[in-house]
Amino acid sequence: MKLPQTKKGFVLLPRRWVVGRSFTWKSKFRRLIRDYERLPEVLSGLHFLAFAILMLRRFAEVIFQSA
């Protein structure tokens, strides 16, 4: 992201909180808190699975609230 030219010093970038929120969501899955896996492919697959579960849960909440 580009910083505005008019501001000097510390500038809070927008959407920076998204990364912190994602790490917090990830910590809900106990297996992802520690790195127990030997292969990086397994670890990345578990991350993908965890975030897929989280997104499906949120999608289901939106669908059932609107119905």
Image (tube, helix red, strand yellow):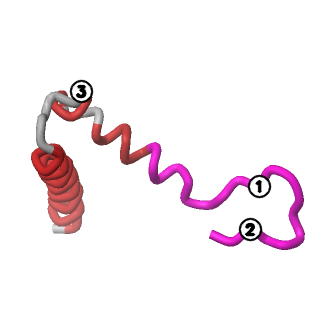
Give the label on residue 11, or none: 1
Residue at mark 3: 34
Q: Separation of disc 2 and disc 3 at Cα?
A: 35 Å
Q: Which mark is residue 3?
A: 2
Q: Secondary structure at mark 2?
A: loop
Residue kind at label 2, given as amino acid type = Leu
Q: In x, y percent, where is residue 36?
A: 15, 28
Report which quarter residue 43 is drawn in.
top left
Between the C-alphas of marks 2 and 1, the distance is 8 Å
Q: Which quadrant is home to the C terminus? A: bottom left
Q: Which residues are magenta?
A: 1-20
Q: Position of residue 55 (x, y in %)?
A: 22, 57
Look at the image and say whether residue 9 sits in the magenta stretch.
yes
Say if the magenta span includes residue 66.
Answer: no
Q: Are marks 2 and 1 in contact (CB under 8 Å)?
A: yes
Q: Secondary structure at mark 3?
A: loop
